[in-house]
Image (tube, rainbow, N blue to C red):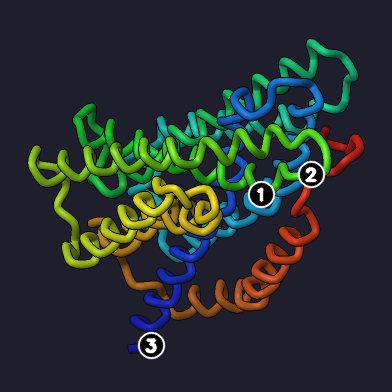
Amino acid sequence: MELLSTTLLSAALLALFVVGYLVLAGSDIGLGMLLPHVARTPGERRRVVSAIAPYFLASEVWLVAAVGVLAGLFPVLEHHVVGGLWPVLVALAAGWLVRDAGLWFRARVDRRRWRSACDTAIVAGSWTLAVSWGLVLTGLVGGGLSPDPFTVLGTASVVSLFALRGAAFGAERLVGPTEAESADAAARATRPLARLALGATVATLFAAVVLGGPVPADAVIAAVLVAVLLAALAATSGLTGPMLSRHTSALAIAVPGLLVALSAQLPTAEVPGVTGAFVWAMLAPAVPVMLLGQVWLYRMTRRPAATPTFFA
């Protein structure tokens, strides 16, 4: 009973870190994807980059924590993920490095071509991250990657959720006394992106049910989660969608992570008591600090800096 309790708590912690990362990183990844759309002038691009940074640093902490829990407490699952998805993970790591390099180095050289190259790296890296995460999540739900309709449509759904989350984030973060065009452009993008995500999700559901897609481990939980996703996207697609998008986009992008955690057929093994006790002794004090730190950082950086900073 003790081992089972440790395993369940550890699985819940892993799910928390993964879902937390998707919700938080979805903001900066999605806004990076939309940079050419919401920022047309040098001043607007600087505001977008300063809105992303340093927010992206905190979101990456959640991914590092998730990888630590996966490697330390679920080695069987880690081998399954790495063994089955290693090409996508390599692309994900490359996109991560390219995107972060663009953010870190953009303000190091005060030349137009340099900043343009860094902006390109941010956009390309953000799209690579979104597509890679779409393939990872779809591959875990589907039991592997294959060029079938479910994989393609599921990946498109996740990518559109990242873009929607970024648009909602930009609509809030880019508001300011001047140069508010980027915030307006991001807000206007929320409804069409929600409709795109809704259509892609419905098509993915059709591929899963009618075309012989993956069978979930718990069909009831999977159905409830899909219904929540469809409801969130439908609400965002309406006339009041831009006002709701801050919350509905977070709820929507959390669903793929919850689908993997609660209904995917993944290999499992009990967490050894000694290992679980050691890892939990290290993580238990850190989790509330992460939560409080994220809230503090969000409130501190709700608006991008009005003057040049380290990142932009």
Residue at 45 percent of width and 58 percent of height: 251
Q: What type is the residue that disc 2 sits on?
A: Gly
Q: Which residue is label 3 attached to?
A: 2
Q: Nearer the viewer, residue 216 or 34?
A: 34
Q: Position of residue 111 (x, y in %)?
A: 87, 14
Q: Is 290 placed above or below 39 here?
A: below
Q: What type is the residue that disc 1 sits on?
A: Glu
Image side of residue 30 versus residue 115, left or right: left
Image side of residue 139 versus residue 109, left or right: left
Q: Position of residue 227 (x, y in %)?
A: 26, 59
Q: Is 51 placed above or below 243 here?
A: above
Image side of residue 204 versus residue 81, left or right: left
Determine whether the residue tagged by mark 1 lies in a helix, strand or loop: helix
* Tag in front: 3 or 2: 2
Q: Could you give the CA–CA distance between mark 3 and mark 1, rounded to whole angstroms?
A: 45 Å
Q: Position of residue 76 (x, y in %)?
A: 35, 57
Residue at 85 percent of width and 43 percent of height: 305
Dot 3: within a 10 Å radius of its alpha carbon, few (fewer than 14), some, or many (20 or more) residues? few
Q: Nearer the viewer, residue 239 or 236?
A: 239
- Upstream in the sequence, badge 3 or badge 2? 3
